Amino acid sequence: MKIFHSPKHTLHNPKYEVYEAAELIEFRENAARMDSILARLELEKYPKYSLPTQYDISTILEVHTQEYFQFLSSAWEEWENYRISNPNNYPSTDYIPSTFASNETVSRHSTIFHKGGMFVKDLTAPISQGTFAAALESVNCALSAADEILGGETFALSLSRPPGHHAGKAFCGGYCYLNNAAIAANYLSKSAKVALLDVDYHAFNGTQDIFYERNDVFTVSLHGDPHFEYPYFSGYAEETGDGVGEGFNLNVPYRKGTTDLEYFMHLQKALDAITDFSPKYLVLSAGVDTHEGDPNGTAKISYSGLVKIGEMIKQLHLPTVIIFEGGYAIDDLGKNFVGLLGGLVR
Ligand code: SP5
Ligand code: ZN
């Protein structure tokens, strides 16, 4: 199995995120997460990583809008230019908007403030100087992994960072800017039917947005119920798709404090639905913020539970592109992620 990784992920390095109300905390989706995973892969004797191939941006523009992509590419610089051209004292910073568009049909996109209010969904997607470059490399890793599968491999791993599943057609949010898994699934969908399974603790609002009106990619997510959990406005069981996509989106929300055995039951339901769809390929959005020690989650999945999740997914017997998403229990992250991975690929 090939593993794709780019050291350029470190270019994405926001300092802070806004947690709740006015509480500023250190940015949790940090570069140390990747170090933890790389160290564990080495310890467990996985092959050394490969650098990704560079793909044309048309692979991204089939999933994200041109306007949004343009915004991401220039946001930090526009923000920096605004700072420089204004007489104030603050030093160069990450960009986090503070004024949000309430109606997405308005199109007053003139300043960075208008654009930020349109395209940024929440206060946990700060844009640092190298965010766009890192996000592109994260996509390149995902597409490189997809090409392995098209070439006949059974598994390929993309160590994508930043993660992607909260990024929609025209928005970033929740640590995500470009939807790595969606871009890989869209790329694979040119060859055959694809299922996308998301086991990150949070609902995949970006992925759902992208495929909601499509029937060639079946999207399934298990997550903390949005009645109490981020992203709050998406991830409900009654959201099943629209138009020809009706019936091709499955949300499986679960209760606060969900434990291993309950989780396996939910997962089996998701796997059965995927089997019924009979896809040729699987894209797995692999987050391990379901772990009992995760500061961003409420689920109580044990280490052995994560291994078992991998083993259950293996029973689909599908060629699978594995894409790293969330997981913030930094001390256990490498062990947890490689545990799920090992259940699946070993
Ligand atoms: C990829 C990924 O895992 N993104 C997660 C983004 C989570 N953002 C959470 C923001 C909401 C914080 N609310 C905390 C409630 C604690 N009582
Ligand atoms: Zn998550």
Image: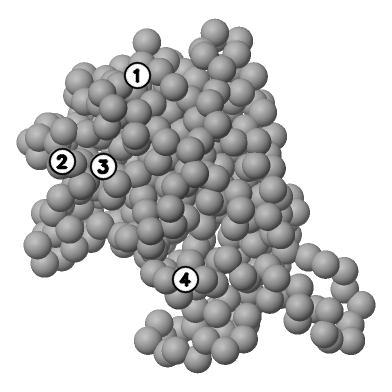
In the picture, which quadrant includes the C terminus?
A: top left
Disc 2 Cβ-to-ligand 1 distance below 8 Å = no
Residue type at the position of mark 2 = Ala
Residue 199, picture quadrant:
top left
With 211 as the anchor, is 276 left or right in this view?
left
Quarter-of-image position of residue 276: top left
18 shown above or below 111: above
- Contact, mark 2 vs mark 3 (Cβ under 8 Å): yes
Check disc 2 and report the residue beneath it: 192
Q: Callout 4: 10 Å neighbours few (<14), some, many (20+)?
A: many
What is the CA distance from the residue labelled 4 to the residue labelled 1? 35 Å
Q: CA distance from mark 2 to mark 4?
A: 28 Å
Decide if ligand 1 comes within 8 Å of the CB at mark 3: no
Three-letter amino acid code of the residue under disc 4: Tyr
The mark found on residue 188 in the picture is 3
Which circle marks residue 27 in the picture?
none
Residue at position x 42%, y 36% from top? 144
Residue under the point 29% across and 46% down: 187
> Mark 3 or mark 4: which is in front?
3
Kind of residue sitting beneath label 1: Leu
Q: Which residue is mark 1?
A: 344
Badge 2 element: loop
Q: Percent x, y for residue 283? A: 31, 37
Query: Viewer-nearest of labels 1 and 3?
Result: 3
Question: Is residue 63 rendered to the left or right of residue 271?
Answer: right
- Spatial separation of the CA atoms under disc 3 and disc 4: 23 Å
Is 73 rendered above or below residue 164? below
Q: Residue flagged by tag 3: what amino acid is it?
A: Leu
Of callouts 2 and 1, the N-terminal one: 2
Q: How far separated are the C-alphas under marks 2 and 3?
A: 7 Å
Please say if 273 is above or below 87: above
